[in-house]
């Protein structure tokens, strides 16, 4: 056999081998494409179903436990949803500005009725700059808080009326609250307390924790969130929540708000007005109404009902929301909070834009807690973009963000928050075009050096 014929045979053998390798590569490519698609489909399904699978995703919302400075709020750990053009207001960069005004649920036979069309607003608005005083410190530190407000640019205070544990901090004249044992004497004389605050020219806000309510859930189990086996759903702290799909839940909240209006509060502030993000939510049975309304729809409708009752009483209505829901459709669907839809009804919307509560890389910031100005500024510029889409002739909530005045020691990369950091956050609020803000510190230890003197 000569050398030339041997080489020809080797070349002929290479042809089939190369063809096989090519076909194999194509098959692997299709397989990878199929697997990636399935992962993405499952991710969306798990997200909409509940929070069980959140921990395994690149974004997550998780409860912070055991941190005294963060007590009372849930941390948002999430990467920004970059596909903003895929759903409702999160496509605001490509969608035309809406022109239809919100209408009441039941219209007349002839035409739609403008929402609260006969409401004449005579309330006087205040550019509020305030602090929060929890029920745990209301007796011990209220006088110190008043003195701080007197000495500085502060002019408002948020105090607990209905706490995270479901208890009401004074003897409210409301039969259902009395019946379930929700009323306490934490504030021994609510009328004297309100008068004292107003004598100092302080704008008064009642914080009402809404859907996280172990007292109502335990005493009226027909209103509680239940697992599919009929047992009560409890969050990671062992606390029960009420079901937002039950009308009686909103009736209870409306009456609590009315009581606050009647004793003289200037505003009611609704907190935890959302779905729980704890593990086990995918096992919750919300009842038949959940097939008719989405999470966002039921929360928005509850807010509408509260506003329709409380605004005519001369009292303002505000809501606390996750900062991440401003621009993330994923987080909005999980918790049921739509920044856009809620703002159609509220007087004030209060995003919790604590830098410590954002995941690494959010807004392109390596460690958000170390960039207080940049985080707050970027979040509030997103707020401007979303609310621009609302019809200026209709209701449009004013924005009053919650700012961080605590050190998040539980975050790996954090700053010690003091005068510079808190003032940077306040400066970011102004630079983003807003004029109001609140500071949060669960221990009621606020940084006076960060505040301008009165």
Image (cartoon, helix red, strand yellow):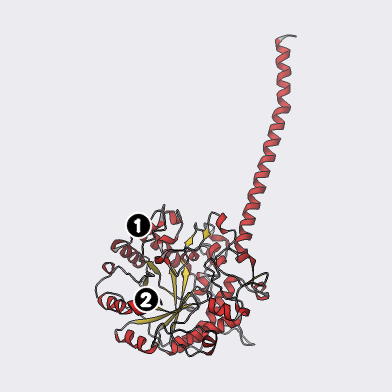
- The tag on residue 188 is none
Location of residue 112 with respect to 370 vertically, above or below: below
- Label 2 neighbourhood size at 10 Å, few (<14), some (14-19), many (20+)? some
| Spot occupied by residue 261 in the image (x, y as percentages of width and height) | 44, 87
**Nearest to the observer: residue 314 or residue 192:** 192
User: Which residue occupies the extreme right position in the image?
Assistant: 1
Q: Is residue 5 left or right of residue 133?
A: right
**Nearest to the observer: residue 291 or residue 188:** 188
Q: Is residue 420 left or right of residue 340?
A: left
Quadrant including the N terminus: top right
Q: Which residue is mark 1?
A: 415
Q: Measure how far apart labels 2 and 1 are at the Cα level.
A: 26 Å
Q: Which residue is mark 2?
A: 137
Q: Is residue 116 visible?
A: no
Location of residue 180 with respect to 51 vertically, above or below: below
Q: Is residue 437 visible?
A: yes
Q: Is residue 5 left or right of residue 73?
A: right
Picture quadrant of residue 201: bottom left
- SS type, badge 1: loop
**Nearest to the observer: residue 427 or residue 70:** 70
Residue appearing at x 44%, y 56% in the figure: 363
Location of residue 363 with respect to 34 vertically, above or below: below
| Spot occupied by residue 105 in the image (x, y as percentages of width and height) | 60, 82
Dot 2 or dot 1: first in sequence order is 2
Quadrant including the C terminus: bottom left
């Amino acid at each position: 056999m000569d050398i030339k014929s041997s080489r020809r045979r080797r070349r002929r053998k290479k042809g089939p081998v190369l063809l096989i390798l090519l076909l194999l590569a194509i098959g692997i490519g299709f397989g990878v494409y199929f697997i990636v698609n399935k992962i993405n489909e499952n991710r969306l399904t798990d997200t909409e179903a509940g929070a069980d699978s959140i921990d395994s995703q690149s974004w997550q919302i998780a409860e912070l436990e055991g941190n005294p400075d963060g007590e009372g709020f849930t941390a948002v750990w999430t990467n920004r949803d970059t596909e903003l053009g895929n759903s409702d207001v999160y496509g605001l960069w490509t969608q035309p500005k809406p022109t239809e005004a919100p209408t009441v649920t039941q219209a007349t036979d002839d035409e739609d009725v403008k929402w609260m069309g006969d409401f004449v607003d005579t309330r006087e608005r205040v550019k509020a700059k305030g602090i929060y005083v929890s029920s745990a410190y209301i007796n011990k530190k209220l006088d110190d808080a008043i003195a701080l407000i007197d000495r500085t640019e502060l002019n408002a205070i948020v105090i607990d009326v209905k706490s995270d544990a479901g208890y009401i901090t004074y003897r409210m004249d409301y039969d259902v609250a009395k019946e379930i044992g929700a009323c306490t004497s934490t504030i021994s004389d609510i009328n004297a307390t309100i008068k004292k605050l107003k004598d100092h020219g302080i704008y008064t806000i009642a914080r009402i924790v809404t859907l996280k309510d172990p007292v109502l859930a335990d005493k009226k189990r027909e209103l509680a969130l239940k697992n599919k086996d009929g047992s009560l759903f409890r969050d990671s702290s062992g606390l029960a929540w009420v079901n937002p799909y039950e009308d009686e839940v909103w009736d209870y909240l409306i009456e609590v708000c009315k009581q606050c209006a009647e004793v003289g509060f200037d505003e009611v502030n609704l907190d935890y007005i959302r779905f729980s993000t704890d593990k086990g939510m995918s096992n919750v049975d919300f009842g038949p109404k959940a097939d008719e309304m989405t999470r966002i729809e039921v929360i928005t409708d509850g807010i509408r009902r509260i506003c329709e009752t409380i605004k005519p009483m001369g009292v303002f209505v505000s809501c606390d929301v996750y900062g991440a829901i401003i621009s993330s459709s994923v987080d909005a669907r999980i918790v049921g909070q739509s920044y856009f839809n809620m703002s159609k009804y509220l007087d004030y919307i209060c995003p919790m834009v604590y830098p410590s509560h954002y995941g690494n890389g959010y807004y392109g910031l390596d460690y958000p807690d170390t960039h207080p100005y940049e985080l707050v500024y970027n979040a509030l510029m997103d707020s401007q973009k979303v609310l621009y889409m609302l019809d200026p002739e209709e209701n449009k909530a004013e924005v009053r963000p919650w700012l961080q005045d605590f050190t998040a020691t539980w975050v790996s990369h954090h700053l010690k928050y003091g005068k510079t950091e808190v003032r940077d956050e306040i400066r970011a609020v102004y630079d983003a075009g807003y004029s109001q803000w609140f500071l949060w510190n669960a221990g009621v230890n606020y940084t006076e050096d960060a505040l301008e003197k009165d």
